[in-house]
Image (spheres, grey):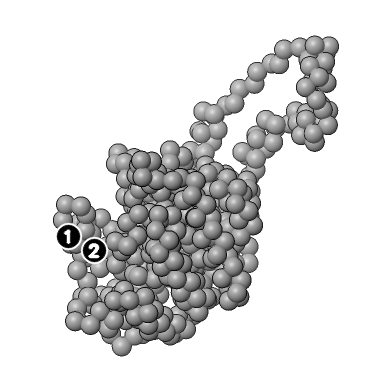
Amino acid sequence: MAKKTVFKPRKQHFPGIDKIAYEGTDSDRALAFRHYDPAEVIDGKTMKEHMRFSIAYWHAFRGTGSDPFGPGTIQRSWETGKDPVSVAKVRMDAAFEFFQKIESPFWCFHDRDIAPEGASLAESNRILDQIVAHAKQLQKATGVRLLWGTANLFSNPRYMSGAATNPDAHVFAYAAAQVKKALEVTQELGGENYVFWGGREGYETLLNTHLKREQDHLARFLHLAVAHAKAIGFKGQFLIEPKPKEPTKHQYDFDVASGIAFLRTYGLEKHFKFNIETNHATLAGHTFQHEIEVAAAAGMLGSIDANAGDLLLGWDTDLFNTDVRELTLAMLSILRAGGLGSGGFNFDAKLRRQSIDPADLFHAHIGGMDAYALAFKIARRILADGTFESFVADRYRSFDSGFGRDIERGKTSFAALEKLVLSRLGEPSPRSGQQEYLENLLTRYLHG
Ligand code: XUL
Ligand code: CO
């Protein structure tokens, strides 16, 4: 785990802000944790180890607050200089100062947000190597580790019609080369996972799209990635991050359920788990907890991209999530599933366009971390009491013995069940699901 001391780079990029301390709920200070005490030990593990928080480089250090109506509003002091590679290194110094000050044990990146793209793939790879060497030193000096790496296969115009699902095999080849390199640098930095988010793997209209061929190509691409990971001895977990729409109208990894079907159809299921993003779940018309539960039921819960949508806006707003009720429900499903393993909670969330101060970056992450830590503690209390567990167990108890058990074990038939109903059971008597009572119980855990 991370060292206790704050790494001191040559220059402080967040000069007025010290390492964020845990001060508890009596504290009035805004730049302090109220619920996330990284050093608190629970069941033999620190909260820092339990939560496995991670900072998303692309939002925290490449986000500018730009939107379709105007350019960036957020200007950082380190974003100056003519040489983009030197700027990328200083930016990374600032990032690691932030990771340490916010007590995040992990970070995540896309290849192209840590290193600028060159004029050719060879040049891009050379630049990436330089930045990765710098990141490796910073990781060593600070103890901050890499939760996952990924490749940006969506920003460059060459990917406008997709990467692995592009109708042009040349683009498929280019994307394969880019992911090969991204996998290798993720391995170089000790990444514990590697993420595939569909980017532009989807379509706008079937007038120009061969859906079956595109899906076959996506599966082929993932098989090639599995083969390359094996070839280089990469041991990290592969993760699929579903999203139903945006940027394309139809994305192939719509949600966890369609992701599972896709992976099983193409014989990929044993190589992948899911990276579930809250805002992607709600865009798909699901709750965050639903997506977690579906992945857990298939033994494929991998990691979380922690953010929130705005239900009044229909797009991927990537807000910091402070909704403790929603997070408590998510935590219940995560803890019941036995946790995230090599995954973590990655703040794939961005500052609002008007939040232009460096301090806003701290407030945003403090809010998200505190909300998750509080939800974790409430969910543990709920599970320890077993209140909902025993309610659910009781609700299904007719399947624990007799003909119910025969149904579960596959030891019956339609004819046998018909005979049973006609001769003995007759009409079932309905039982209340008691939803309102259970919701009130949950409110008591949340608010007393
Ligand atoms: C896009 C998104 C990505 C992935 C990584 O909506 O969530 O940033 O997390 O490519
Ligand atoms: Co994400």
Considering every residue shown, the one lying at the far bottom of the view is: 10
In the displayed structure, does residue 82 sit left or right of residue 245? left
Which residue does the image show at 60% across and 56% down from the upper left? 268
The answer to which of 408 and 227 lies nearer the viewer is 227
Whether residue 132 is situated above or below residue 102 in the rendered picture: below
Q: What SS does tag 1 mark?
A: loop
In the image, residue 247 lies at what x, y percent? 34, 50
- Does label 2 or label 1 sit earlier along the sequence? 2
In the image, residue 363 lies at what x, y percent? 31, 61
Q: Dot 2, crowdedness within 10 Å: few (<14), some or many (≥20)?
A: many
Mark 2 to mark 1: distance in Å? 8 Å
Mark 2 within 8 Å of ligand 1, using the beta carbon: no
Tell me whether circle 2 and circle 1 mark residues in contact (CB < 8 Å): yes
In the image, residue 246 lies at what x, y percent? 35, 48
Whether residue 111 is situated above or below residue 82 in the rendered picture: above
Which residue does the image show at 34% across and 80% down from the upper left? 123
Which residue does the image show at 34% across and 69% down from the upper left? 113
Q: Which residue is mark 1?
A: 71
Q: Which residue is mark 2?
A: 64
The amino acid type, in three-letter code, at marker 2 is Thr
In the displayed structure, does residue 316 sit left or right of residue 258? left
In the image, residue 211 lies at what x, y percent? 45, 45
The answer to which of 184 and 148 lies nearer the viewer is 184
The image quadrant of residue 94 is: bottom left
Q: What SS does tag 2 mark?
A: loop
The amino acid type, in three-letter code, at marker 1 is Pro
Foreground mark, 2 or 1? 1
Whether residue 341 is situated above or below residue 397 in the rendered picture: below
The image quadrant of residue 234 is: bottom right
Which residue does the image show at 29% across and 76% down from the upper left? 119
Res. 260 visible in picture:
no
The answer to which of 310 and 201 lies nearer the viewer is 201
